[in-house]
Amino acid sequence: MSFIILLVAYGVRRLLDSTQDEGLDPVLRRRLARMPGAETDHESRPALPILLLAVPIILVALIDIGLSRSSWWMLTWPLDLMVLVFAMGVPGWRNPIRAYGEAWRRGDAKAAWHHVNHLIPAEERGAAAAPEELHRSLARQLILIIFERYFLLIFWYVLLGPAGVIGVRLLLAWRDHWPNAATRVPFARFTSLMAWVPARLLSFSFGIAGDLSGWLSHTRKKLLNPAVKSRDLLFVSANGALSSYSLDPERFASAHPGDWPDYGERSLRAVRDLLNRSMLVWICVLALLAISGVFV
C-alpha cells in the first residue's frame, strides 16, 4: 500500500506544482524568520534548531508506530499521503522558467536574468551575467531542487516512512532558511551526508534513462568520489546523459547556430524529460520491491 500512496502523492504534488500553490517553503521561511539568529552565542551551540528538528520527527514516528500497531492502522495511509504531498514539490518554478524561455528566444538576456535570478543561489548571481553561465546555474539548480524535493524524499520515505520525510524536509529548510548563517553550516553538511547515496542512485538513473555511453564518459570517475558534491555530480551526470549538447551552450551554438534562439527552452525541457524518465526508473524499481514484499 505504501507504493500506491507514493504514486498518488506524486501525482497530486505534480498537479499542485502546475498551479499557483506556494507549497511549504514560504510557511517555513516565515516561521524560521522569527527564530533567534543574530546572537553569537547560538552559533556554536545550535540546541534550538536541533530541538525543533527532533520534536516533529519523533512525534510523527510515534504517531505512525502507534497507529500501525492499533486497530486504526488504516489511518497510517492518510498520514503518509498528507506528509508526502506537503513535503514534496517545487512550486513557483513553472512560470519563471516559461518566461525565461520566451526571453531567451527574443535574445533579451537582461529579461531572462530578471525572470530567474531569484531561483539560482545568491553566490552565483554575480557570475551569471553571461547568458551561458546563467543557463548553467539555472539548469544545475533545477536538477538539484527536483532531486531534493522528490527523489531525496522518496528515498527516505522508503527507508524510514513519514518520519524520514519530515526529517529530511525540515533539514532542508533549516539549511536554507535558519536566520543564523553559522548555524546553517552543520545542517548543510548533514544534508550532504543524507543526500550522498540517493544522489548517486539518481545519477545512475540518468545513465539508464539517457545516453549510457555519454553518462559513463562524464561520470564514472566522479560517481564514488566523496569530495564531489551532489549538485555538481547530478549536473555532470545529466550533461553526459543528454545528447545534442543540451547542457553545453557553447558547443550547441557552434553545432546548431540556427537553433540558438530556442536553446533555453529546449535545454530545460530536455532536463525535465530526463528527470521524468529517471522517476519512471525509480517507480519501476519500487514496484518490483513492492511485488517482492520489501516495500509494503
Image: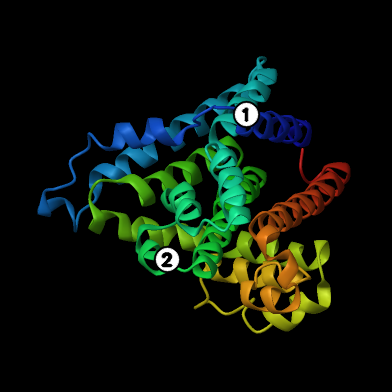
Q: Mark 2–mark 1 contact, CB under 8 Å?
A: no
Residue displayed at 50% across by 59% down: 109
Percent across and percent down for residue 176 are 37, 50
Q: In the depicted view, which residue is nearer to us: 92 or 109?
A: 109
- Among numbered discs 2 and 1, the one appearing first in the sequence: 1
Q: Which residue is mark 1?
A: 16
From the viewer's side, name the closer residue of 105 and 69.
105
Q: Which mark is residue 292?
A: none
Q: Secondary structure at mark 1?
A: helix
Q: Quadrant of the C terminus?
A: top right
Q: Residue at x 64, y 21 (%)?
A: 78
Residue 97 falls left or right of residue 217:
left
Residue drawn at x 62%, y 29% as measured from the top left: 16
Position of 272 compared to 289: left or right? left
Closer to us: 35 or 257: 257
Q: Is residue 63 visible?
A: yes
Count residues near mark 2 (Cα–Cα under 10 Å), then give few for <14, some for 14-19, many for 20+.
some
Left or right: residue 31 versus residue 291 is left
Against 199, residue 226 (above or below) is: below
In the image, residue 213 lies at what x, y percent?
82, 78
What is the crowding at mark 1: few (fewer than 14 residues within 10 Å), some, or many (at least 20)?
A: some
Distance in Å between CA atoms under marks 2 and 1: 32 Å
| Three-letter amino acid code at the position of disc 1 | Leu
Q: Is residue 73 above or below residue 95?
A: above
Q: Which residue is mark 2?
A: 129
| Kind of residue at badge 2 | Ala
User: How far across and down, in percent of the image, does residue 38 sit?
Assistant: 14, 48
